[in-house]
Image: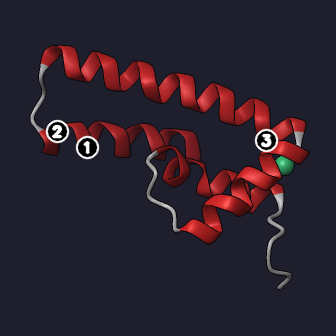
Amino acid sequence: MTAGHLSCFETIQRLDLYLDRALGEDERRQVEQHLEECVHCAQIYAFEGKVLIEVREKLQRVDVPPMLRLQVLNLLARERGG
Ligand SMILES: [Zn+2]
């Protein structure tokens, strides 16, 4: 394993965590580095970020309990994954 270089697959896997700011410092930097170098992943990141922000705004507006919010986000993640 080469430290500091993620494959596209590894980057996509970490995108949700990255958007949630749930990654550690090292992994965050690796994702950022990959996004700077890879147009393909940068596009996915831009799209995912937009979707996630829209979903969150909607959820905030209807004031859903946090548990339900988590379930919705998990469902979305599963849909994207499968
Ligand atoms: Zn990539």
Tell me the distance, in whole angstroms, between the alpha carbons under discs 1 and 2: 5 Å
Kind of residue at disc 2: Leu
How many marks the image carries: the answer is: 3
The residue sitting at 49% across, 39% down in the picture is 79
Q: Are marks 3 and 1 in contact (CB under 8 Å)?
A: no
| Number of the front mark, 3 or 2 | 3
| CB of mark 3 near ligand 1 (< 8 Å) | yes
Label 2 sits on residue: 68
Give the quarter of the figure containing the N terminus. bottom right
| Numbered tag placed on residue 41 in the rendering | 3
Q: Are marks 1 and 2 in contact (CB under 8 Å)?
A: yes
The answer to whether residue 41 shows anywhere in this view is yes
Q: Position of residue 8 (x, y in %)?
A: 81, 54
| Number of the front mark, 3 or 1 | 3
| Numbered tag placed on residue 71 in the rendering | 1
Tell me the distance, in whole angstroms, between the alpha carbons under discs 3 and 1: 26 Å
Q: Position of residue 42 (x, y in %)?
A: 78, 36
The answer to whether residue 82 shows anywhere in this view is no
Tell me the distance, in whole angstroms, between the alpha carbons under discs 3 and 2: 29 Å
Q: Position of residue 40 (x, y in %)?
A: 86, 37
The residue sitting at 15% across, 41% down in the picture is 66
Query: Which circle's residue, 3 or 2, is located before the other in the chain?
Result: 3
Kind of residue at disc 1: Gln
Taking 31 as reference, is 48 above or below it?
above
Quarter of image, res 55: top left
The residue sitting at 77% across, 30% down in the picture is 43
